Image: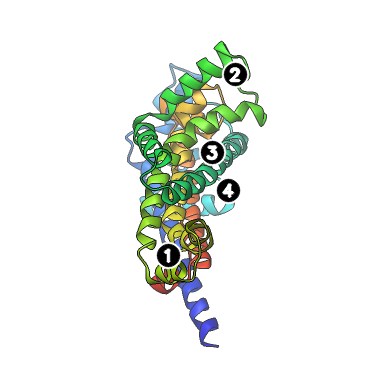
Amino acid sequence: MGNAGELCKRIGKRLLNFILVIWGVVTLSFCLQVFTGTDPAEMMVRKINVMATEEQIQAMRESLGLDAPFGERYIDYIKGVLTGDLGTAITNRQPVIENIKDALPVTCTLIVMAMAWVVLFTVLLSAISVIRKGGVFDNVTRIICIIGICVPSFWLALILLAAFAVQIPIFDVISDGSFKSLILPSVAMAVPIICIATRVLRAAVLNELKSDYVTYARARGFSSTQIVYGEVLRNALPAAITLFAQYCAALFGTSALVESVFSIQGLGIYLMESCESMDVYGISGSILVCGILFVLFNTLADVLSSAICPAYRRKTA
């Protein structure tokens, strides 16, 4: 009964935090529309008619509700977010939510593939580096990680594109959205994160190896491989999981450069095009989606860390 009450308390606390942060993201997205100094009504009207009169612009303002008081606009915006109405894009006069729906699936696929590389190679490289601490593999891995952290994703994307799509034509130069065409961009996005996460997880594992239960396990005759894979990784994973979640969400905002290199029509490209055309509805809608995903991934990381590691669960209770 006590455990059930403690579990409900933790879930309620995380749910409340999630709602508050989402409300903050929505509010910031609304402020982005209001305080940018750009008049969406004028941009929409002049996109159709450069010689539009002030009366025509004012009529558009009234139809968009831009002449309403601040509080009323804020409430209408929250209602719109709850119903999926993020406004009409200035660039193509289509609902922003429809533009995001068209762009989001390919970006999500790209990021899922990138994070799959991250999780696989981070755990593998960290574990082997710790088991062979001070050896050739460990030293080479640490050097590569330092170099990889300094390499921007878009620059790595250009190198991969030139090497494996031009010089050695294994992949297509222009992505068509298929699994094969997303391998190179996902690798380009994953490498810097792998390098950072490997260093974090390696340090966390080395710190866990100083624990009493590791000494006890060694006294019982367990090998380093058994200790690292069987016990230590579970207790060291929360730090890496939190990092995974943060970078997974951040990739939605940083994917634009990689998507532009490989001509992928994803959310990053849509956000970049909205910025270039000063489309405040497209910008705020894209940032809102990225912010919600960021909060969602971090909440899931917190829950997953608690499920994997009992020590982390006691720490956050």
Location of residue 167 with respect to 53 vertically, above or below:
above
Residue drawn where x is 38% and y is 54% of the image:
71
Residue 216: x, y in percent? 43, 72
Q: Are marks 4 and 1 in contact (CB under 8 Å)?
A: no
Helix, strand or loop under label 4? loop
Residue designated by label 1: 17
Residue designated by label 2: 174
Quadrant containing the C terminus in the rendered view = bottom left
Kindly tell me whether residue 298 is visible in this rendering: yes
Residue type marked 2? Ile
Residue type marked 3? Ala
Which circle's residue, 4 or 2, is located before the other in the chain? 4
Quadrant containing the N terminus in the rendered view = bottom right
211 or 241, which is in the foreground? Answer: 211
Residue drawn where x is 48% and y is 80% of the image:
6
Residue 13: x, y in percent? 44, 71
Residue designated by label 3: 114
Residue that protrudes farthest toward the top in the picture: 167
